[in-house]
Every structure is written in structure tokens, then in C-alpha cells.
Amino acid sequence: MSDAIESRLKELGITLPQAAAPAANYVPYTISGNLLYLSGQLPIEGGKIAVSGLLGQDVDVAAGSRAAELCAINILAQAKAALGGDLGRIVRILKLNGFVASVPTFTEQHLVINGASNLLANVLGDAGKHARAAVGMAALPLNAAVEIDAVIEIAP
């Protein structure tokens, strides 16, 4: 399965980056039984925040969706690191929590987080379909437009 996921990433033109190191006093992931909990991932590309600011003011839905895609790519990178390089151990993405930095009148957080949901479904098929939340926030760390964490079911 790992080879199939890697092939699908290549077909989609996605190269997973090195998993980001924590920026504060936390760990990037924890594993309990068959559950992998990933800390929030930011839209980092090339070592820096690629999409910053508030949706509805500085960032449009398309750019926000791209930010969510980058968060999903970083989720897969963290999962790969947590699983010793074997993405084939992913049974299913169970839950995403999507946080969107937005002005109070912005109400399309769900469309922004679709960027991550669509990417994970495209890469993992049915295993990428998940429950989720899409929540508006006043601000996010490092002025990121989006942050997403994940809970993933894994095989031993």
C-alpha cells in the first residue's frame, strides 16, 4: 500500500517535505494503540508560511484552499515520519480539525478546508475520507491562514 500511496503522490506532482519540527513545547505526534494524533500543521512550503493573513480580508477562498492543501501535505509528511516512512500503515484518516484565520463576517471556512479534504481523498482514496470540523479563528500562529490537525487510524 505504501508504494501505491507514493505512486499516487508522484502522479499528483506532490513531493512530501521533511516533517516540520515543533515550534514550541509540544511533540509533532503521539501514538496510542492504533491511533496516530498529529499536531496542527501550518501551510508551510519551502520552509516558510506560504499563505498568511485573514480570509475575507487578505486571503481569498482559492488561496485559503491552497493553504489547506499544504497543511494536508504536511500532515502526510508528519504521518510518514511517525510511521517510520511507511504510509501504507495508514488505515484511514479519521478526523481533521481545520482552523481558518478569518474576519468575523467570513463564513466559508468549510470551502477552505475542502482543500485538505480533497487532497487526502485524492491521495488515499476511501482511506482519506474523514469526519472534520472547519472553524473560524481570530488569528493563528505565525499569521498562518490555516492550521489543521489530524487523527489517523494506523495498522501495527
Image (cartoon, rainbow, N blue to C red):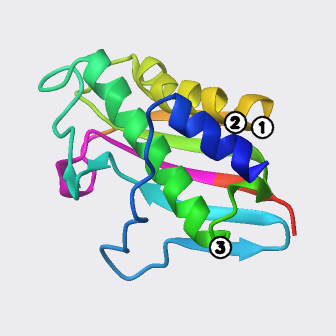
Farthest bottom residue in view: 25
User: Which is nearer the eye, 23 or 87?
Assistant: 87
Q: Image height check: is 84 above or below 9? A: below
- Quarter of image, res 11: top right
Quadrant position of the C terminus in the picture: bottom right
Can see residue 38?
A: no
- Spatial CA span between label 1 and label 2: 5 Å
What x and y, as percent, mark residue 142?
Answer: 19, 56
> In the drawing, does residue 131 fall left or right of residue 44?
right
Image position of 124 with respect to 3: above or below: above
- Judge whether residue 151 can be spotted in this image: yes
Mark 1 falls on what kind of element? helix
Give the mark toward the camera: 1 or 3: 3
Q: Which mark is residue 127?
A: 1
- Sequence-wise first label, 1 or 3: 3
Which amino acid type is shown beneath numbered disc 1? Answer: Ala
Q: Which residue is mark 3?
A: 84
Q: In percent of the image, x 18 and y 25: which residue is there?
A: 59
Over which residues does the magenta segment extend?
138-150
Cα–Cα gap, marks 2 and 3:
18 Å
